[in-house]
Image (cartoon, grey):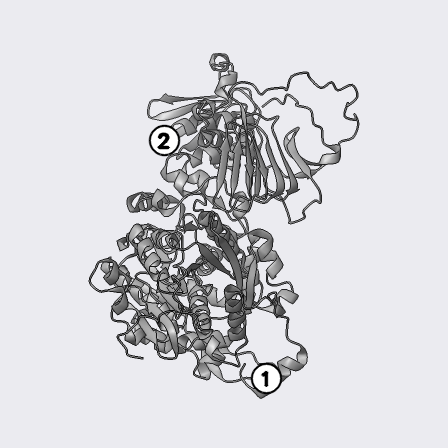
Amino acid sequence: MSTIRGRGRSLEIAIDRALPAAIAELRVQLEERPAFFRGSRAAANLGLVDADLAALEALRDMLAEFGVTLDGVSGDESLAPLLAQLELAYLGATPAEEVAAIPRPRLKRSQVLSDGARSLVADFAGARADLAARRTEREAAALERQTPVGTPVASAGVTIPATPHSAPAGISTLYHRGTLRGGQTLHNLGNIIVIGDVNPGAELIASGDVVVFGALRGVAHAGAQGDASARVVALELAPTQLRIATMIATPEGSAVERGPQHAYILGDRIAIVPHAVADLGRREVPV
Amino acid sequence: MHELQSEPAPDASSQPRKRGRAIVVTSGKGGVGKTTTTANLGTALALGGATVALVDADVGLRNLDIVLGLEARVRNHVLDVLEGRVTLDDALINDKRVPTLRLLAAAQTREKDDVDTPAMQALIDSLRDRFDYVLIDCPAGIEKGFTNAIVGADEAIIVCTPEVAAVRDADRVVGLLGNRASIKLIVNRLRPELVRRGKMLSVEDVNAILRLPLLGVIADEPGVIIATNKGEPLVLDESSSAGAAYRAIAGRIAGTDTSAPEIPLPPTLLQKLGSFFGGRR
Amino acid sequence: MSARRIVLTSGKGGVGKTTTTANLGAALAKRGKRVVLVDADIGLRNLDLVLGLEKRIVFDLVEVVEGRCQLRQALIKDKRFQALSILPAAQTRDKTAVSETQFAAVVDGLEGFADYILIDCPAGIEHGFRNAVAGASEAIVVTTPEVSAIRDADRVIGKLNERSLPIRLIVNRIRPEMVRSGDMMSVDDVVDILGVKLLGMIPDDEEVIDTTNRGEPIVLTPDSRLGEIYEKIARRLDGEHVPFTALTAPGLFGRLFGARKAG
């Protein structure tokens, strides 16, 4: 894991993995104490990590967001001309023992979510802070129309259990009949079902799935505490913004697909899939 | 009619008076025509024979008196009544052109926070005991002024122009109004020619979001600004089409007009030439 | 050099504050200024909508105040301009969520990002208005040449004078043909009544409705009459002496009815 250490009156940033990932890690750390480093100067040590011009620029810009000025970078000498273009100092090659000494604690699963997101009382603000922390340099994942090819949904041989399946303890489904107007919100630790429209300016935030039996025109956040297998389903999917776990999607253009649609994470994007061909299984998606 | 006597003529029948209807005219967004609508609907209902009280709830930024042309006659206002300095009867201003219409003006030099919400509710209730209709002109926004304006009303009229910002604000207000007996829509300032060219939202576009029963649609015309500047409600002008639209809406509110609202159409070329050569409107 | 913090207010709703804030901000950004627009209309936000940025909102002003995100995270950069960003209001809260001191602190926080901070004020003179003004050191009052709007503008000017803010006036939605026929007040009449220095006069133009519905600032429309006028106002705001230009009213056959000043 990339680290930030104070050294005298400046900061030393040790990078031990590919820059884009390192930048995301550093961002999480900086956001825990956003004002703490403001006004500092820093030097980054890339060790043996490669970087291109865009990645170096992104590192510099990300640090600048927190008021940290990147003065120079040490690492492989191929960095030197790139740094010159960005008007950053090349601080020389990193000595071998320094590279070995860069601490590399393993990323614990529980570190992925912020304190807020982990709390049982669903603090969705915490989840959203986490969401911002994990956002990459690209603005938002685009919505993609996809017809999944290949394996048909296995439906033969489904048995109906003798007793109704009950949700795990503490998880509920909030059922609301009626149209949600701008400014109204529904939050639930669990799923949310709305029979009615969700107008622009209204928000649905669920740790589970969001289902709208009507037109979804507002904002829906499914998997708000980090469950990337959650999904949003609507009769008419025309949201102002769609969020699943830590991904945000902003629909491009005003084309509205006819008929019920599902939205769920496929790979590194949110896919929009017509109900007729949507995969209904609960997949494990690595965060 | 004697100036100081502001009590409407007593009901001829011996039955107890049916409680009046209290309707708030609101929108969320400012400048869409709430005050003009309140003034015109009130005037039209009164011309039809009903007793009507208009209440200006826009404390600090009162305008209902201007639109009715009564600003010179304002002596007392809502806060004077609520704070016990003057009786309701003395504060109600009558309109010589329309005998069964009364206006309760807002205070100009005070703030909306000065109005106590339960007291406002009580005021509207007492007006309902004396008038067939109490129309409340709501201020823009959703702050204390809005809360005070809606508290006494169990019906609401949403005024909305065909613009995205207005629709969004109106939707917020509908959400805040909650469960009221009736919430209905007036679409104001429609420009049918722009709708035809795809440069303005249509009535269907507006109601796709708001989903409210439509009371009426009023087309934009320069006559509206002229009339409000002069303090002459449009419903008094036989040649105004906006005035006619307001009269029809009043009829629908009263239940005497069962026609469906008309959506104004773009003018034909002949009509355009006619208006250019023949006159202003 | 510190940023100029300007609140755009009116008293009366619907006179064009938000549209003016958006377009004036865009015009300033076009001139290379760093501009941040702040929507102070908590609960009824519209600034994002008229700029077409509503789909990109993740955080808002209330969340900044409540410390749930950084100011920088809440700013949305308008990609059509070099340095134009907006700080959106919250939609699901109301104006009491933020105090005057908190609002002023947020505007303070924007100092490093901007040459111009334009604050879009909500209608009225209540809590939202007080918040918006608390963040400002100058004011622009927007009015239309209608009696009700002028009365409300007058009230607002009184309130602004209490706080000793320098004030300039924009008169919006002028219809020159109605001024000529005596059915609308002239800009001179309005300036006389309100007694405030004129910054700009903007004619009524149906293009504005379409552009705000589409989320496109009109300064991006090439050869737009209104776009040019906003750019002139931006230059005046920046200290340039720009004379008010003559405006002709369009007739059915394009005949000139005589010049009326506007710009």
Q: Position of residue C193 (x, y in %)?
A: 31, 74
Judge left or right: residue A105 versus residue C130: right
Q: How many marks?
A: 2
Closer-to-camera residue (B188/C216): B188
Q: Type of residue at label 2?
A: Ser
Judge left or right: residue A256 versus residue B243: right
Q: Residue at x 40, y 58 (%)?
A: B140
Label 1 crowd bin: few (<14), some (14–19), many (20+), radius 10 Å: few
Residue highlighted by disc 1: B276
Residue highlighted by disc 2: A40
Q: Residue furthest left?
A: B85
Q: Residue at x 75, y 33 (%)?
A: A277
Closer-to-camera residue (B57/C254): B57
Mark 2 against mark 1, which lies toward the viewer? 1
For numbered disc 1, what is the local secondary structure?
Answer: helix
Above or below, B202 against C99 in this view is below
Judge left or right: residue A2 versus residue C161: right
In the picture, the quarter occupied by the C terminus of chain A is top right
Label 2 crowd bin: few (<14), some (14–19), many (20+), radius 10 Å: some
Q: Position of residue A227 (x, y in %)?
A: 57, 25
Q: Type of residue at label 1?
A: Phe
Distance in Å between CA atoms under marks 2 and 1: 70 Å
Q: Is residue C150 visible?
A: no
Judging from the image, mark 2 belongs to the subunit labelled A
Q: Position of residue A67 (x, y in %)?
A: 39, 35
Judging from the image, mark 1 belongs to the subunit labelled B
Closer-to-camera residue (C113/B91): B91
Q: Is residue A183 visible?
A: yes
Q: Residue at x 43, y 36 (%)?
A: A64
Q: Position of residue B172 (x, y in %)?
A: 48, 50
